[in-house]
Structures are given as C-alpha cells and as structure tokens.
Amino acid sequence: MKLFWNPPKITKNLGRYTYDIHYAALVHEGGDSSQVHYPARSWTDRAAAEADVEAKFAEFYQQTGNLDAAFNLLVDWFAGQMQDKLMSAEWAWPHITLRENGDVAGLIRDIFDMGELYRSLQVEVTK
C-alpha cells in the first residue's frame, strides 16, 4: 500500500528576544559592585521553565493550520510570558527601597520598576 501525504513545508524560523538596555544582564544574572550585591532575577529562564511551549505551538497550529503562522504566534506569546515575569511580584531583593515613582518596594517584588527594562524588549523573527 502506498501512502500519499502532502507534509507541511518546513522553514527554518528563528525567534530572537533582546532586552536592549545597558543593565539587563545585571538584573538577569546578578552581580556585585563595591557597595551592592545584585541577586540574579532570571525572568527569561523562569518563563521558559514554566511555559508549555509544545502544547502552545500545537494549539496555535490547530488554530491556523500553518506552521509559520503558529511559530509567529508562539514567539509573540512567549514574549508576553517573559514580560509577565517582569511584572510578577516574585523576585527577592535584600532590602526595602523607595522607588523613583514613590512606591515602596519590599523584599519580594516585581522587576518592572520604572518600565525601562520592560519597554526595551525587542522581538525579531527571521526565516
């Protein structure tokens, strides 16, 4: 018996996420200065660990019937997951501080602050 099947065309797509601000790596990886220890707050890693990417891709493929469209939706969805982690009050900080906007940030806080890091996200899809 011969099997006749028209498989979907596979393209090599790449989604690239860049937080394009000078202190993004310090927030993500942590580090020390002469006066302050900055704990790592790896929001992208946590988003990836908690995301069910395979299920989301399958859902988007079922919606669109197109691999490229499903991939593009997945890239945008995951960008949102990372941004949600920045906004989530789950990040440890060694002391209470007064933010520039007047808010008091406690020992567990979000890493949104004034939004510069959040707004610096650039998303690129290449084929």
Image: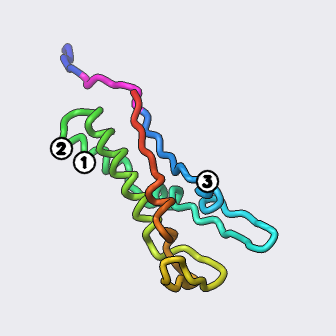
Q: Residues within 10 Å of mark 1 (few under 14, many from 20)?
A: some
Instruction: Report x, y in % for residue 102.
Output: 49, 83
Residue 102 covered by magenta stretch:
no
Instruction: Report x, y in % for residue 59.
Output: 24, 48
Left or right of 24? Residue 36 is: right
Q: Which residue is mark 3?
A: 22
Q: Which residue is mark 2?
A: 63
- 85 over 123 or under it: above or below: below
> Which one is nearer the viewer's eye here, 38 or 60?
38
Residue at 48% across, 83% down: 103
Q: From the image, which quarter does the C terminus lie in?
A: top left
> Which one is nearer the viewer's eye here, 10 or 86?
86
Residue 11 covered by magenta stretch:
yes
Q: Which residues are magenta?
A: 7-13
Residue at 42% across, 44% down: 123
- 69 over 47 or under it: above or below: above
Q: Which residue is mark 1?
A: 59
Residue at 46% across, 60% down: 118
Tell whether label 1 touches label 2 (CB within 8 Å).
Answer: yes
First reached walking from the N terminus: tag 1 or tag 3: 3
* Disc 2 from disc 1: Cα separation: 6 Å
Q: Amino acid at mark 1?
A: Glu
Instruction: Report x, y in % for residue 119.
Output: 44, 57
Disc 1 vs disc 3: which is toward the camera?
Answer: 3
Give the dominant element type of the magenta stretch: helix, strand or loop.
Answer: loop
